[in-house]
Image: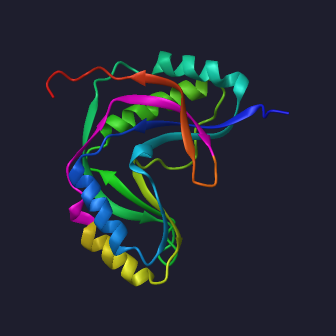
């Protein structure tokens, strides 16, 4: 029998420039001795809200609420700022990048939360921090060297990233990592001054 649920989240896909990809390549090379599952650039996104197992029968209601609550936004360009890790110092779990002025993302997060609350999803108790997951740490041989590399490479991730839409995603877990499929999306207005 087919599942009555999809694993879902709401996120902001983003586009990165070649210098970003070069910095990523150097970071991966410098950390090649560690067990890290790197996020593929075609899957880069900012998660605004992870819903987990969501009833298929609620998909349309969630999509409609998002369209009703998410304001009319121009495409966003944000400056990258800060390479870091989540998790305990001796066993970090995630390598991430932050943003210098994440107001654009924070506004969208509030609108998404309002839409979801109207669909019966209580607000998340987890503190939101706008970030791009570069990789998930599976095991470290040398946490000290790991943090030295992260600190040394922090300034190599510079430039801007662009957001063109908000997407209600289905996440399908597989042996080669997750596959993301768009269930619904809200396109942002083209910014004519770009």
Image quadrant where residue 84 sits: bottom left
Instruction: Quarter of the image for the N terminus: give it.
Output: top right
Judging from the image, the colouring scheme is rainbow
- Residue placed farthest to the front in the image? 176
Q: Which residues are magenta?
A: 154-172
Percent across and percent down for residue 53 are: 69, 39
Judged left or right of residue 56, residue 48 is left
Percent across and percent down for residue 159 are: 20, 49
Percent across and percent down for residue 155 are: 21, 63
Q: Is residue 81 visible in this depiction of the protein?
A: no
- Residue 170 magenta: yes
Magenta stretch, overall SS: strand
User: How many marks overall?
Assistant: 0
Q: Is residue 153 visible in this depiction of the protein?
A: yes
Judged left or right of residue 41, residue 81 is left
Q: Residue at x 48, y 67 (%)?
A: 36
- Residue 16 magenta: no
- Residue placed farthest to the left in the image? 193
82 versus 122 height, above or below: below
Instruction: Quarter of the image for the C terminus: give it.
Output: top left
Percent across and percent down for residue 65 are: 55, 19
Q: Residue at x 50, y 50 (%)?
A: 127
145 versus 185 height, above or below: below
Q: Residue at x 41, y 44 (%)?
A: 42
27 versus 123 height, above or below: below
153 versus 78 height, above or below: below
């Amino acid at each position: 029998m087919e599942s009555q649920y999809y694993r879902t989240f709401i996120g902001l896909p983003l586009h990165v420039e070649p210098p970003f990809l070069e910095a990523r390549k150097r970071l991966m090379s410098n950390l090649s001795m560690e067990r890290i599952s790197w996020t593929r650039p075609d899957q880069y996104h900012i998660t605004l809200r992870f819903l987990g197992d969501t009833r298929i029968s609620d998909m349309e209601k969630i999509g409609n609420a998002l369209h009703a609550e998410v304001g009319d936004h121009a495409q966003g360009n944000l400056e990258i700022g800060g390479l870091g890790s989540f998790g305990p110092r001796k066993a970090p779990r995630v390598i991430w990048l932050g943003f210098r002025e994440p107001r654009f993302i924070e506004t969208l997060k509030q609108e998404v939360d309002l839409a979801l609350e109207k669909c019966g999803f209580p607000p998340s108790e987890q503190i939101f921090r706008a970030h791009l997951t570069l990789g998930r740490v599976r095991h470290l041989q040398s946490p000290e060297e790991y943090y030295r590399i992260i600190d040394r490479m922090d300034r190599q991730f510079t430039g801007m990233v662009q957001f063109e839409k908000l997407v209600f995603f289905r996440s399908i877990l597989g042996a080669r990592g997750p596959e993301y499929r768009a269930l619904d999306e809200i396109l942002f207005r083209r910014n004519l001054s770009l």
